[in-house]
Image (cartoon, rainbow, N blue to C red):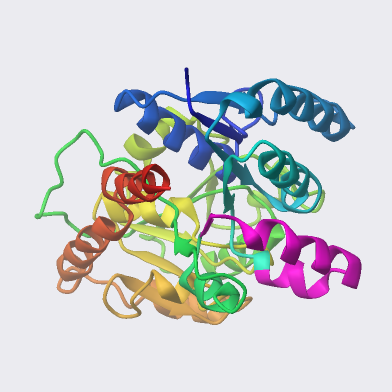
Amino acid sequence: MKQILIIGPISGKTYGGTTVLMQDFYDYLKANNIEFRFIQSNKFVFKGAFTINFVYVIIKCFIFIPFSKKVMVNASSNGTFYLAPFIFIMSAVFNSKFVFRKFAGSFDELYTEANSGLKYLIRKTILKADLIFVETQHLVNYFSEYSQYIHWFPNVRQKPNFQYSNTRKFKKRFVFISHVKRGKGIFEILECSNFLPDDYNIDIYGPIVDDEIDLELFKKFKVNYKGSLPPKEVLTTLNQYDVLLLPTFLPTEGYPGILIEAYSLGIPVITTNWKAIPEIVEDGLTGFLIKPQSSKALQEAIMQFNVKNYLSFSKAARAKFSDFDRDIVNKRVLDEIIKL
């Protein structure tokens, strides 16, 4: 009998930060021969599928929770307010331990902006969980007044299969890999590109998910749009560059996974002093933190890298990756769950 029931979205028809993180934890459990049942919360993918997925998960929970000693819900915003409270109540009815994991870094804002009824529901359900995992240290501190069982579960990545080179050379190759939209800072990259020397190269990868952006736009700037990348090609592609650019000001930003993937390769980053990002980027050591929505600040940061200082940035970025190593972090989280 599988005594742990895990609920969450995995990679398949949809792909994004939450599905990557859930898939990673799922794969880790499988690789370490942990017995568990799994309910895929994003099984159906079409317009209006949230209701169908909600009903599907609830039905599956009625079937499996009576036979599960521990139930772990991994949720984004919708799952936090609508799905997790139901599953908390079902777990309490069947005397199962309840574990909640919130993806991304906006849980505090979602809570403060919620109406009094939703806040009450969250306090009486999710925040009464036997274990709570959140993505940032800020969220740990914020919700510690509601629960003493809250822990840090940062964005993690598996260590790359190829060997890190401590002799990386700076060749003025910069890259953006993410959803191509305004909130990720794509316009700041475009604007600054025309003011860079001609021997600087900026390539952009990712699906265009913004109506303001089309292929013709890129032709006006000194960048190369390379299209979307399959997940399996992200690391090999990223490894061809010197510095990652992510001038994001997205309201829901937590720990962007692409920053951690860059660290795993010893690639420094230029990103923004935004939300919880300063928790994982050491300004002037693993890269640079810049003012959000400033193409001038981005240009200045790009010009800070040179052949003399690049290797020290690279080594610091690689060393920082140990904080987000999949095997280290997932083992710590799994140990906490098993101890319940």
Where's residue 217, x and y in %? 71, 51
Residue that protrudes farthest toward the top in the picture: 1
Is residue 301 shown left or right of residue 48?
left
The reply to whether residue 125 is visible in this rendering is yes
Q: Is residue 220 left or right of residue 229?
A: right
Residue toward you, 201 or 285 = 285
The prevailing secondary structure element of the residues shown in magenta is helix
Indicate yes or no whether the magenta region holds residue 133.
yes
Say above or below: 162 vs 152.
above
Asked if residue 35 lies left or right of residue 225, the reply is: left
Q: Which residues are magenta?
A: 108-134
Camera-side residue: 253 or 241? 253
The residue sitting at 70% across, 28% down in the picture is 61
- Classify residue 292 as left or right of residue 330: right
Count of numbered circles in the view: 0
Where's residue 291, x and y in %? 55, 82
The residue at the point 53 percent across, 53 percent down is 223
> Could you say which quadrant of the image residue 129 lies in?
bottom right
Tell me, yes or no, if residue 250 can be seen here: no
Residue drawn at (33%, 55%) of the image = 324
Which residue is farthest left? 167
Quick check: is 228 in the magenta stretch?
A: no
Residue 119 in the image: above or below residue 328: below
Q: Nearer the viewer, residue 90 or 165?
A: 90
Q: Position of residue 24 (x, y in %)?
A: 43, 36
Residue 308 in the image, given as x and y percentages of width and height: 14, 73
